[in-house]
Image (tube, helix red, strand yellow):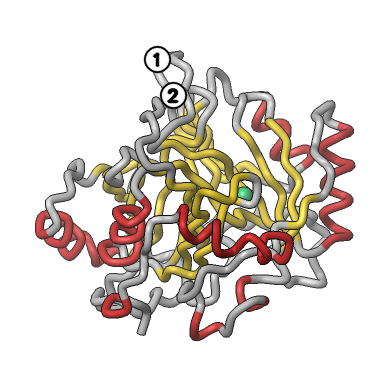
Amino acid sequence: MDKMSTKNITGIHHITALAGNALKNLEFYRDILGLRFIKKTVNFDDPGVYHLYFGDYEGNPGSILTFFPYEGIRRGRHGVGLVNTTSFSVPAESIAYWENRFEKYSIPFKNVQERFGSEAFMYFEDTDGLGLELVFNNLDKRGPIPGGDIPGEYAIRGFFGAEIWAAGSERTAALLTDKMDHELIKESGSRVRFAAKNEPGHFIDILVPSSSTRGLNGGGTVHHVAFATPDKETQLKAWHAVKRHGLDPTPFIDRQYFRSIYFREPGGVLFEVATNGPGFAIDEPLEALGTELKLPPRYENRRESIETQLQPLNDPSKSFK
Ligand code: ZN
């Protein structure tokens, strides 16, 4: 937490997406991408469904990708008004490693391309069609996410950023820069990049695609993007700033690992502002994150009936070491 900062928003906190089968989701992000499985809990608004959290070792903001897996969910559609690509930061020298790894696991990927002159990236999708990228760069000061079979020199560091598709970038850009402490970082063609913290993990790209087809939430789409705020005081300031912008933020909601507000930005994407604390070690030790089903206190008395509705995910042989 940066006490010197006057910013209410300090970057990306987490990104939450919709998935189909829970076990496939777990295997893709933990076993193939090498993220740490940091929390197994339920959707607090729909406790018959998992909420699976992935991230770096501690689950630091800027690394947290979460899923609501609904078995048999109808696929969504990428398009305007959604975050369509979630990108991960990997070292510049890891291109060949990841190409080989995706071939080994039969994961289709597009050839490496460049944007902004020299930013190399590779597009791929998870088993539900969620848009993902690896961005090959040497700007990232974070260490590798440990624990899997990926050598540290190639492993994911956390997010690189998120890409929003918009019919026009102006209104979302105005919200980000005027009320959410973001700055314009660079722009090229139909892509404009913003960040509250100018480093990998926190980039928000707004892309104006050639097609104006609206996105549709469903399997393989991002449900919302959450921005990080240091504490409850800065969150209250962010709430007022968003309100002054003419938007309609929700009341403060306790999400056990952070406290949240939600609002829809002018381009249609659901935004959240989440506190950095208390974090994922609040209900299990850091070294044991993700090993047990965790429920918020209000659902503990329903644990048995909740557990019977959920697909078993335990596979100790693959758990984090
Ligand atoms: Zn969220």
Position of residue 42 relative to residue 110, above or below, is below
The reply to whether residue 150 is visible in this rendering is yes
Q: Nearer the viewer, mark 1 or mark 2?
A: 2
Sequence-first disc among 1 and 2: 2
User: Ligand 1 within 8 A of label 1's CB?
Assistant: no
Pointer 1 local density, CA inside 10 Å: few below 14, some 14–19, many at least 20? few
Q: CA distance from mark 1 to mark 2?
A: 8 Å
> From the viewer's perspective, is 257 left or right of 22?
right
Q: Secondary structure at mark 2?
A: loop
Q: Quadrant of the C terminus?
A: bottom left
Query: Residue 311 at what x, y percent from top left?
Result: 38, 56
Q: Residue at x 51, y 30 (%)?
A: 82
The reply to whether residue 195 is visible in this rendering is no
Q: Residue at x 65, y 30 (%)?
A: 172
Q: Quadrant of the N terminus?
A: bottom right
CB-based contact (under 8 Å), mark 1 and mark 2:
yes
The residue indicated by pointer 2 is 79
Query: Residue 51 at what x, y percent from top left?
Result: 52, 55
Q: Quadrant of residue 241?
A: top right
Q: Quadrant of residue 263?
A: top right
Query: Residue 24 at what x, y percent from top left?
Result: 29, 53
Q: Which mark is residue 211?
A: 1
Q: Relative to the observer, which residue lies in front, 256 or 261?
A: 256
Q: Which mark is residue 259?
A: none
Q: Relative to the observer, which residue lies in front, 29 or 161?
A: 29
Q: Amino acid at mark 1?
A: Ser
